[in-house]
Structure formats: C-alpha cells, structure tokens
Amino acid sequence: MELVCPAGTPASLRAALDAGADVVYVGFRDETNARNFPGLNFSPEELTESLKKAHDMGRQVYVAINTYPQAGNLEPWYKAVDTAAKIGVDAVILADIGLLDYAKRQHPELRRHLSVQASASNPEAINFYRSAFDVQRVVLPRVLTVREIAELIGEIDVETEVFAFGGMCVMAEGRCSLSSYATGKSPNMNGVCSPASHVEYEQRRGKLVSRLGEFTINSFPNEEAAGYPTLCKGRFVGHTGNPSYLFEEPTSLNVMMMLPELIQAGVKALKIEGRQRGKAYVHQVVSGYRKAIDAAMKGDPVPFVDMGNITEGTRSTAGAYEKNWR
Amino acid sequence: MHDKNAPTRVPPFTPMLFAGFFMRPIPAVTFKPVVKHVLARMKKLYPEIFSRLAILDNISFLIGPTDLHYRFYLSVREGEVQIDVGDNNTQGHECQAAISGPMLDLIKLLEGRVDGDALFFSRTLNVEGDTEAVLTLRNAVDSADVSLGDVLAGGVPFIKPGFDKLLSKAGSLLGCFEKDFGTVQRSILLPLTRQMDEVGKELDRSEDRLGKVDKEFVRIKASLKKTLQSSERVR
C-alpha cells in the first residue's frame, strides 16, 4: 500500500518524506493545478531539487496538472506537462482528455494517472481512459463505498488510489460550479475553490462571519469550531427559519480505521489531501498514516492516532466509504 | 481599514497574559531594534519566504498577540518587507489585513510547528481584512524551516547551540506554565461550568415539555376544527 502525500512547498515535501511518505504530489505555481493558491506550489527549480531529494531517499514525486485547459489558452498546460517530463517526475496526474492525449503523444514514457477531477467512478469510464490514454492509475472520487471500490477493482486493469484523509468534496468532482457561481473562479478551470481574493472574515456581534463574494457562508459563535468558506459547507436559512448545513458540515475525511478493508479490497495507494495546509499538518498526518499502514500491512490492529486537532471543524467522518446514511 | 484595531475577543488565559502585566511599563519602542534585527536575519537566512511575498504589493499586516498589548506591523512595499512594533495606542499604521492569536501560537506558526488552518478551525487564530494577503503570508512563512535559534544566533555558529538550548528550555517551561494555567482556569470555572450544565439540562427538559404542549395544542386545534365543521354541517 503506497502512501501518497501532499506538499505545497519544498519544506512540506521534506516534512512528508521525513514522516514516511512513499510518494509526494505537488503542483506548479499557476492555474494548471487544483490548489492554485497565493504563495503556494513549486517553481521548476524547486521541483528539480525536491525530486532529487526524494529519489535519493528512494521515494517518488507526482505532479498534479489536473485543471481543465481553457479554450484558446492551452499553452500553460502543455508547458506544465513538458516541464514535468523534462524534470523527470515519476508520474503526472491529469484530468482533461485533451491533455492526456497530448501527454501520451509527446511523452509516451511519462507515467499518467487519472485525477479525481476526471470523476471516473465506473468500469466503463476507467477502462476507456486506460485504452485511449494508457493511464496506469485512477484516483477514485470520494463517492464510493469500500464494497463498491472492491467490485470496481475486479472490473478494471489499472491501479486504484483512494483518498484517506483531508478535506471532503461532496460534489461531483471536476464538475462542481458552486465556486464559479459565487466568484467566477472554479477549482476546475482556475485551480481555486473559493479563492481567497473573494473570501472575507469579520467579527460581528461575537460571531465569526465568513463571506464568499456576495454570499454569507457561515456565522460561527465564539468557541464553535470553524470550517472552510466553501458554499458546499455553508449554513443556510431554509423554510424552518433555523440556519443549518444543506450539503455537508465542516468535517474532514479520515478512514484510518478502515485500512484493513481497503487493503482487502485491493486498493494500491492511499492519498492524503491538503497541499494548501502547513508542514505541521503534513508531518502529523503522514506520521499517523505511516504507523497505521505499517500495522495494517502486518495484520496488526490499526492503532488509534488522534487527528482531532487538525481536522476541519475539529471533526472527522468516513464519508461515503461507509455511507451510513443509506 | 484596520487602524490600531485591537483584537476584539477576550484575551486567552495564558502565561503571556500574565507576563504582559509586568511588561506593560516597557514601551514598544524598546523592542524595535530586536524586531528589526530578527527580520534582517530572516531575510538573510530564508530568502524563499521573501521571494514568495514578492507577489504582494502595498500591503500592511497587523499581527496582534491577543495576550500581550504589543502589536507588530509588517508591510510589503515594492518588494521590500519592513516591520515595526507598537502597542494598543500606536497611531498611524493603516493595515489591510489583521492576524491575531496567542503569542506562543504565533511563534509556533512562524516556526511551522502548528498548522495555520488548524489554529483557524479551532478559533485560536483570527484573521480579518485581505484574506488573500494573509494566505500568501502564511504560505510564504511555511515554505521555510524557520528556527528562532538560528535567527537569534545572528550568524555566529558557536552561540547557536546555546540559543537552541535556551529556547528549548524556555519552550518546555512555557509549555508547563500553559498546562498549569489551563488547570487554574478550569478550577476557577468549575462551579460555573457545573451550574451551566444544570441550566442546560433544565433547558432540555423545558424544551421537551414545550414540545409535548405544542403537540397537544395542535391536536386540540384539529379536534376543535373538526367539531366546528360538524356543527356547521348540522346547521
């Protein structure tokens, strides 16, 4: 079981490697990746240096180029693929079929993974990506139960990577338009879900009020744990008159206790979300999962590792993996 | 916009709050050379931070420890980063973004020992104003492995181990103090907490009773309506 960990900066990458990551995934400093946040990500020079460090330690680096190229402006995405290939990264994580095609034609030797942003969740879709673009791995959307994942693995011949920890995305990934609706910018095209340039926090009458564009997303009384300012985790006033969460409460995914089942299902890699988080987060989550995977692989009980302090809303869920609401 | 805006929340009960009482007579200007020296050292030791900050233009941050009366003003103008220190009464700093939290947490954040989002989720850290600028600053600072020991040693290698040892001892001591302060706080608040729990339980019971009364009211209303309809038909 491969542990795939996030890094938004070279310092985070070093933290991930020190904590026991098998693979670190990163992005360039532009809109070609889904964490296009200010002050974050890697320059080609930083990536070259970081890749050398990872390879020296016998680990790997993947590059996410997983946003959708804009019509008439394909160059940044082609350039990102070319740069990743030139630097010699171990794989690129892509979502767009045009870009997959470009990568396959221009750099056939460069390993291609299908990003979660492609939202491929059935055997027909995944097998198509395999036959058309020779993808070696698919990152599954966070909508399947462990049983569904096991059944899916039986019907495809590519490796599977699943999210184990971090931010929850409750919408159809790669197709969500909530951020676009509120700000004109989306994770799919611009690499930003709820861009910071449109986010505002204000202390109002003893409450923390978060706004996105023209919308008030939430209002947290003092002492209540807060979450990210995304519309999908907003608290809205419905017919009852009481504000409540319409889609999802602020919470993080954590499937550590389900590791034996995921191993049994034949999952090849576990992904930790959070390239936008600090290196302290990276170190804590990666250390915890390293310990848990090592125990589960030996058939030992999975140790309890407290992650409460770093979860969104200071809560966690196994989400769709167990779908206990159905 | 954020001119001399003191943190709006009640200060946390920390060792720094206690220390602040004794530091109150010391004017902020006393710390200016130290703070400027720290920034100069950081520029030399961690250029990656400042290259990431270069995308900011004409931005001033107010960094306010919630348990001290001092304030730090960090500005980025035409690629040049500068710092100043003041107190609650300092005038003339127009800031576009404000970050506030307990002093020790701000130091841990600087050294990358805690995650900024986690501090924000737990409401330990508060941000206001230009969120994009705050995020840029956080990401820039987190991109380097900052060590206060390295910064304070001032480039003199043989005194660095001494500083590291001193900071480590101070850190452990402050950690112990933090725990003790927590215990004292819980102990002071215990009677109040118990009382609040009782009030909470009574509120739950009242809510249940009200719910039952509400249901009964709906039932009586429906029954009355039925009776009225029957008597209408009889007429």
Image: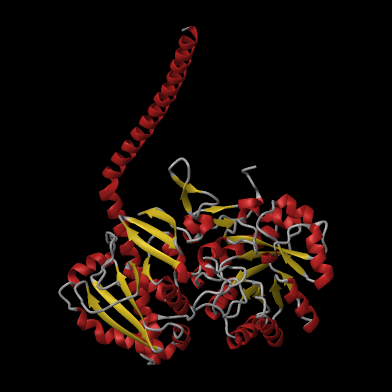
Is B75 or B58 nearer to us in this picture? Answer: B58
| Horizontal relation, residue B71 to residue A208: left or right | left
On the rendered structure, is A249 left or right of B38?
Answer: right
Q: On the rendered image, what quadrant is the C terminus of chain A found in?
A: top right
Say if A25 sits above or below A241 in the image.
Answer: below
Residue drawn 76% across the image and 79% down it: A102
Vertical comparison of B8 with B60: above or below: above
Side of B223 where A119 appears, left or right = right
Is residue A306 at least partly visible in the picture?
Answer: no
Looking at this view, is A242 or B147 the one in front?
A242
Q: Residue furthest right?
A: A131
Q: Position of residue B27 (x, y in %)?
A: 17, 78
Q: Answer left or right for A261 relative to A129.
A: left
Residue B80's spot in the image, x, y percent? 38, 89
How far across and how far down the image is residue A259, in percent? 66, 56
Farthest residue, direction top? B234
On-image quarter of the N terminus of chain A = bottom right
Q: Is residue A270 in sight in this rendering?
A: yes
**Residue sitting nearer the eye, B65 or A122:** A122
Residue A137 sits above or below residue B184 on the image: below
Image-quadrant location for residue A226: bottom left
